[in-house]
């Protein structure tokens, strides 16, 4: 990719970050909340895309990891009075470790069997959230303690937004560099052919474990931010629809496209808000959008953009329709 083309792509990405940075200056409280929710789901979609789109592992445990991150951060703040600056990274670490533990038995499974096993884990996690009253406060959940940003002169909503924005920008920067690193290339190698990957000295078991860990890390971080944003943690927030929602974001954005998953997250956070008056049609709308994306744009938004702007092929080069 030429320097000029790379420069133009960076301008587009940079402009997107600037828009989100300026949201608090131009948005009302509701719009600020929606923008914050978009930031949270960007992390979720990118993390899931590492696992499904790049590494080719059809796993759906991210909804559970999202919940574990929310409960981990929330309970550390509520029961142990930890500050957000400490509870969020520790809650994220706990989720990452659980992701690694889940990866160990999952490494023996592939395709549909892996998908079913991870969906079963997601349902088991939901059951645990509901029934482990002594730890999770049961089906009623719990209210998050108030996060005070008075020291730096910000009210709660602005403070939470800037925390989410800062964390998301950092995580996206790390993720984008990971995609272009040796680890990112190893992900794509095992997706294309595990046998071929092993022939060029890629440790398939280790690479899959790293993919599960990174996906869990992003989901755990997003879960902690989600808990703080909503101010309440209840089990129903992490049901099977959460799994479907995250998968739709990745598919609509483009499997194996880093920035495509970001755009997919923005679109599918905006859609429910646009359909707020038509809640009974929401699930139908998601189904229609997913079906339309699969039929009209098999490579998602990333493939559509590449057709319109061919010189953006390099930044989006790992979309699944390149296979």
Image: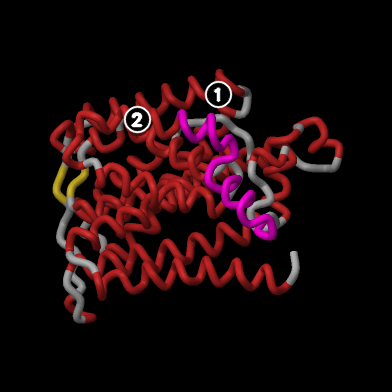
Residue 261: horizontal and vertical position, in percent? Answer: 50, 48
Closer to us: 304 or 55? 304
Residue farthest toward the front in the current orientation of the protein: 308
Closer to us: 113 or 244? 244
Closer to us: 26 or 35? 26
Tell me which numbered mark, 1 or 2, is placed earlier along the sequence.
Answer: 1
Distance Cα–Cα, label 1 vs label 2: 16 Å
Which region of the structure is painted magenta?
291-312
Q: Specify the color scheme.
A: secondary structure
Query: Most prominent secondary structure in the magenta stretch?
Result: helix
Q: Which mark is drawn over residue 66?
A: none
Residue 91 vertical position relative to residue 177 in the rendered view, above or below: above
Instruction: Determine crowd level at label 2: few under 14, some 14-19, many 20+ residues with C-alpha closer than 10 A.
Output: many
Residue 211: horizontal and vertical position, in percent? Answer: 59, 43
Residue 112 vertical position relative to residue 195 in the rendered view, above or below: above
Q: Quadrant of the N terminus?
A: bottom right
Q: Residue at x 25, y 61 (%)?
A: 82
Q: Quadrant of the C terminus?
A: top right
Q: Residue at x 16, y 57 (%)?
A: 145
Instruction: Determine crowd level at label 1: few under 14, some 14-19, many 20+ residues with C-alpha closer than 10 A.
Output: some
Q: Residue at x 72, y 46 (%)?
A: 186
Badge 1 marks a residue whose secondary structure is: helix
Residue 223: horizontal and vertical position, in percent? Answer: 34, 48
Is 176 in the magenta?
A: no
Label 1 sits on residue: 114
Residue 274: horizontal and vertical position, in percent? Answer: 25, 46
Badge 2 marks a residue whose secondary structure is: helix
Is 305 in the magenta?
A: yes
Image quadrant assignment for residue 87: bottom left
Would residue 110 be found to the left or right of residue 26 on screen?
right
Q: Are marks 1 and 2 in contact (CB under 8 Å)?
A: no
Q: Which mark is drawn over residue 125?
A: 2
């Amino acid at each position: 990719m030429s320097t000029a083309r790379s420069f133009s792509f960076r301008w587009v990405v940079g402009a997107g970050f600037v828009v989100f940075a300026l949201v608090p200056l131009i948005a009302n409280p509701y719009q600020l909340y929606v923008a914050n929710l978009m930031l949270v789901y960007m992390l979720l979609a990118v993390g899931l895309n590492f696992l499904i789109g790049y590494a080719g592992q059809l796993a759906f445990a991210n909804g559970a990891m999202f919940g574990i991150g929310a409960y981990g951060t929330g309970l550390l703040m509520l029961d142990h009075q930890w500050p957000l600056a400490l509870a969020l990274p520790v809650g994220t670490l706990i989720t990452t470790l659980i992701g690694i533990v889940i990866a160990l038995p999952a490494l023996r499974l592939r395709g549909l069997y892996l998908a079913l096993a991870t969906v079963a884990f997601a349902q088991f996690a939901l059951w645990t959230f509901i029934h482990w009253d002594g730890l999770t406060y049961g089906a009623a959940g719990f209210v998050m303690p108030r996060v005070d940003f008075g020291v730096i002169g910000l009210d709660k909503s602005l403070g939470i937004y800037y925390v989410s924005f800062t964390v998301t920008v950092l995580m996206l920067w790390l993720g984008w560099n990971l995609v272009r690193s040796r680890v990112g290339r190893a992900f794509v190698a095992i997706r294309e052919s595990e046998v071929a990957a092993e022939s060029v000295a890629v440790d398939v078991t280790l690479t899959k474990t790293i993919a599960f860990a990174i996906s869990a890390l992003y989901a755990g971080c997003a879960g902690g931010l989600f808990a703080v944003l909503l101010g309440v943690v209840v089990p129903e927030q992490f049901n099977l629809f959460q799994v479907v929602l995250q998968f739709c974001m990745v598919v609509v954005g483009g499997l194996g496209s880093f920035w495509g998953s970001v755009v997919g997250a923005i679109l599918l956070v905006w859609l429910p808000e646009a359909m707020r008056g038509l809640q009974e049609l929401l699930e139908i709308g998601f189904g229609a959008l997913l079906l339309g994306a699969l039929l009209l744009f098999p490579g998602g938004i990333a493939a559509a953009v590449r057709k319109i702007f061919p010189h953006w092929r390099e930044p989006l080069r790992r979309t699944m329709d390149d296979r």
